[in-house]
Amino acid sequence: MLTQTLGFPRIGRDRELKRAVEGYWKGEVGREALAATAASLRAEHWRMQREAGVDLLPVGDFALYDQMLDLSLMLGCVPERYAGRGEPGLETMFLMARGGVGVGAMEMTKWFDTNYHYIVPELAAGQAFRPSAGRLAGELREAVRAGYAAKAVLPGPFTFLALAKTAAPGLDKWSLLEPLTEAYEALLREIGRECGWVQIDEPVLVMGLPGTARDRFRPVLERLRGAAGKARLMLATYFGGVAAQAGLLDGLAADCLHLDLVRAPEQLEPMAKRLPKACALSLGLVDGRNVWRTDLARALDLGRKAVELLGLERLMVAPSCSLLHTPVDLAAETALDPEVREWMAFAVQKCGELRLLADALAGRDVMDALAENARIMERRRNCAKALNPAVRSRAAAVTPKMTARRSPYSVRNEEQRTRLDLPELPTTTIGSFPQTTEVRAARAAFKAGKLDRMGYEQAMTGFIRRAVEAQEAAGLDVLVHGEPERNDMVEYFGEQLDGFCFTKNGWVQSYGTRCVKPPVIYGDVSRPRAMTVEWWERAAAMTKKPMKGMLTGPVTILCWSFVRDDQPRSATCRQIALAIRDEVADLERAGAPMVQIDEPALREGLPLEPEKRGEYLDWAVECFRLASTGVSDATQIHTHMCYAEFNEIIEWIAAMDADVISIEASRSGMELLEAFGRFHYPNEVGPGVWDIHSPRVPGAGEMIGLLEKALRVIPRERLWVNPDCGLKTRDWPETEGSMRNMVEAARKLRRPKA
């Protein structure tokens, strides 16, 4: 029985890829050195997987920035504005990802329901594809020379088109399916000569395809199978079940189908019964999205059912999806609570679990390992440190009254305007300010015991003063304290909440070189003490302007953590919401006139299967309201969302009833505002006018153009002016210049006072 992975973390055990790429951007690492680091990491990751027991290894899952960006380049799908700017290949890729002098970056958004961000493919009218698989073919040869069984990995054409955007008004992107299919055929003819398997990823099948695309799915897959030549074709689905799309897969023209049996175990039997006899089945039995050890007994029950249905020879064992979304190796986590650590598995350990499952299903003697796994599962179920009766009682006592503001927005708005006395088109930022080397060094020194509490507080207060003075100098209307004390918008809160633990090196990629170290929620969540009030009070004392309190919302803390899998996610989210509710109340008592509760992950958590979305949105919105509604009408509640499509969920965003929502909008040229206009969103909106993920300073005129677009959709009395997101990744010169331009843009568009 073969084991396989669909993908592996690419950043390296110690984030070697991040340092190499960022060094290249700074001119400190040369092109050859960057290529050598990338090749070394690929070889190391293949070795780690093979030594853990994986038979069939993925090639093409590695990217210097993003695999969808790599695919756009492989297909020759490069927007015209990047043509002739720098050397083709590497320089073009980074220009598309980050922008540069005179040209902005391509749009970026979340990869399905994960916190990974991809670069959105862009399609022009009369789009021509110029396919070239040279890079991928070269990496396949690397793997084969090293003695590995290699499998090429490509996002499929239906997923590519579904996730792409059109640059030409009225262009039907599905009209490009035929030339795109021809481009894929050319790629597969080239790479099919270099490997035994080609994996075509079509997670979009979980969501369903539009009618015109549904009719073409089977014919296109047949053509791809033919183009692959001697290489066998694997169709990979994940992030949910595809049983609702089973009709598309009848007579499947593939040699293997991969199913996510962690998210959708119920799909095994109906899909196995419809599978053509010549087609194998890859069982996604190990969770590729979380850090918990697999309950092998439960996974084996599914595996044995598959053996009954199909026979051992037609099965493979795999993670549910790519292991990109997990940290690399648990071995370095020596500081974790040993009791909690034994419940966990990172990418390397999950590869070992695949081997155990395959051996057990094949009848090999792994009884000792299975017995130890069963003992660990039992110890986890009975661990007292994961259970808090008081937290559970409080969550059970939540009433509908606790999830509603005292008055509707129209009433609250009058009180807030009187209290705040802000100008038309008020300017603000999203929360964080540059996390400079000095800021990070002070935090690290304090954490290592090299800086005492007094010295740490003095340092942080100085950084806060720097942020406040910069905002006042730029002329912003509503200020923030800059968050120098926060390492990460979720980790910071998790460190102060009971029920969380933290890894030392549990990094995962968020976008490009941006890595995050998600907290681990292992038990019931509560707030022992105030988390942000003291820092807010220090900042508020430095200015006469309104100072926002800054919090991360319950859904985002949930989605951006590794969440316990022994109770419903909704139950954990409700516990977090109650903890944030307490913090909001404390900020209001301290005098905060407004509190921002960020929920960038609300859309991300949406299940891909349409039939499951309503239930999720209901409890997610309820949790936000539970966190935010325990305040007076005069206290203004803000929220922030970024890099997500809002059309499908605008009704629920409105139901959150935040007084002000700020959203990412600059990369899309305000396209994301269309949903707010069609829905007639009733509250206030701050569409971003400054792309903070690009290292450039947008001019005031550029921002005015974006605001004029926004004013066609949002009445000026309900329009705010702000960047797309927080500023922690930017440097101070960029930040100060962009803030000045943003304030200038707002002032030029304000009407004269009567």
Image: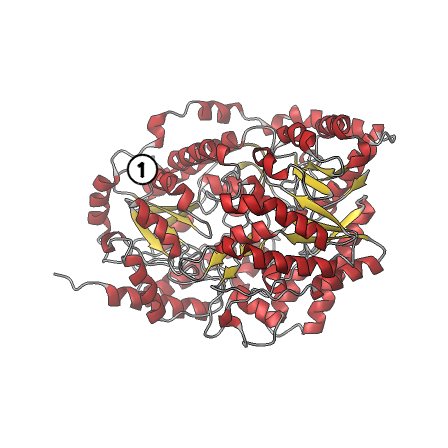
Q: Amino acid at mark 1?
A: Val
Q: Viewer-proximal residue, 19 or 203?
A: 203
In the image, 665: left or right of 353? left
Residue density around tag 1, few if under 14, some if 14–19, many if 20 or more, within 10 Å: many
Occupied quadrant, residue 545 = bottom left
Occupied quadrant, residue 475 = bottom left
Q: Viewer-proximal residue, 693 or 386?
A: 693
Location of the C terminus by quadrant is bottom left
- Which residue sits at x=49%, y=62%? 693
**Callout 1: SS:** loop
From the top left corner, tell me how far across and down residue 67 is, in percent: 62, 57
Location of the N terminus by quadrant is top right
Q: Is residue 567 above or below residue 555?
A: above
Q: Is residue 82 above or below residue 218?
A: below
Q: Viewer-proximal residue, 409 or 274?
A: 274
In the image, 584: left or right of 88? left
Q: Is residue 564 above or below residue 718?
A: above
- Residue 242 visible in the snapshot: no
- Residue 484 visible in the snapshot: yes
Label total for image: 1
In the image, 282: left or right of 742? right
From the top left corner, tell me how far across and down residue 550 is, in percent: 40, 48
In the image, 454: left or right of 715? right
From the top left corner, tell me how far across and down residue 443 is, in percent: 55, 56
From the top left corner, tell me how far across and down residue 161 is, in percent: 54, 53
Occupied quadrant, residue 690 = bottom left
Looking at this view, name the residue that lies furthest to the right.
365
- Which residue sits at x=28%, y=64%? 746
- Which residue sits at x=70%, y=65%? 135
Q: Viewer-proximal residue, 169 or 723?
A: 169
Give the residue pinned by disc 1.
631
- Which residue sits at x=58%, y=70%? 92
